[in-house]
Image: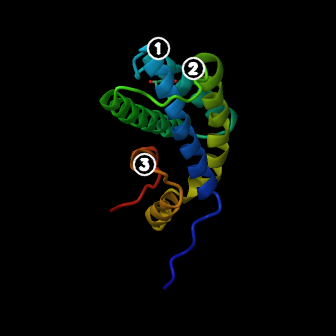
Amino acid sequence: AVPAPAPDSLRPLLVTMYERLSIADQVALSKWDTRQPTQDSAREAQVIANARKQALERKLDPDEVAELVAAQIEASKLVQYGLLAQWQAAGKAPDTPRPDLSTQVRPRLDQLQARLLTEYAKFARYRTDPNCPLWLATARSGLIKDALHGQGLIRATGDLCITAQ
Ligand SMILES: C=C(O[C@@H]1C=C(C(=O)O)C=C[C@H]1O)C(=O)O
């Protein structure tokens, strides 16, 4: 039998996750320049608190949404640590323009979060579909630009499907 096609809501959700992951490059550049640590626990707590608030406004489960956003944060750090290690090994970071972390990059991450929740809400009911892992693997492979961001997207979507193995 031909497996059921992925719901239309999956790709925009993954695209948004991948866009958030791509912003990790700018975050890492800013941290390289300023020698700020990658981990910022206070900012993470704010991002998650904001996600819980948005979940309630949208009648989504706040714990579920907090987990989803925590996975995006972990994925972002995975990419940041990977890039910083590459730049350390090379002795230099790319010579590209640096948007400011607090006034430009974080506001962009905050904007993306609303979109992430809108798209998550549309996909949520398919998380337990037995085809979910197959849909996910297929959709992911159409997006990935390099190994590190690929690992990031795997981390970001690691608990998206809820299926008995
Ligand atoms: C993206 C950042 O780096 C890390 C990841 C975060 C995130 O993904 O929201 C938040 C704080 C940091 O631990 C950041 O500092 O803004």
Queried on whether the Cβ of the residue with tag 1 lies below 8 angstroms from ligand 1, the answer reads: no
Residue hosting label 3: 159
Type of the residue with mark 1: Thr
- Report which quarter residue 106 is drawn in: top right
Question: Which dot, 1 or 3, sits closer to the camera?
Answer: 1
Q: Residues under labels 1 and 3: Cα distance? A: 33 Å
Which structural element holds mark 1?
helix
Q: Which mark is residue 101?
A: 2
Q: Residues under labels 2 and 1: Cα distance? A: 10 Å
The quarter in which the C terminus is drawn is bottom left
Whether residue 86 is situated above or below residue 36 in the rendered picture: below
Residue visible at 36% across and 61% down? 164
Q: Alpha-carbon neighbours of circle 2 within 10 Å: few (<14), some, or many (≥20)?
A: some
Of 41 and 160, the residue lying toward us: 41
Queried on whether the Cβ of the residue with tag 2 lies below 8 angstroms from ligand 1, the answer reads: yes
Whether residue 58 is situated above or below residue 141 in the rendered picture: above
Left or right relative to 54: residue 87: left
Q: Are marks 2 and 1 in contact (CB under 8 Å)?
A: yes
Type of the residue with mark 2: Leu
Q: Which mark is residue 47?
A: none
Of 53 and 44, the residue lying toward us: 44
Q: Alpha-carbon neighbours of circle 1 within 10 Å: few (<14), some, or many (≥20)?
A: few
Residue visible at 49% across and 65% down? 138
Q: Earlier in the sequence, mark 2 or mark 3?
A: 2
Which structural element holds mark 3?
loop
Q: Give how far across and how far down residue 161 sits, in percent.
A: 45, 55
Residue hosting label 1: 34
Q: Are marks 1 and 3 in contact (CB under 8 Å)?
A: no
Whether residue 84 is situated above or below residue 131 in the rendered picture: above
Type of the residue with mark 3: Asp
Left or right relative to 42: residue 81: left
Q: Give how far across and how far down residue 118 sits, in percent.
A: 67, 44
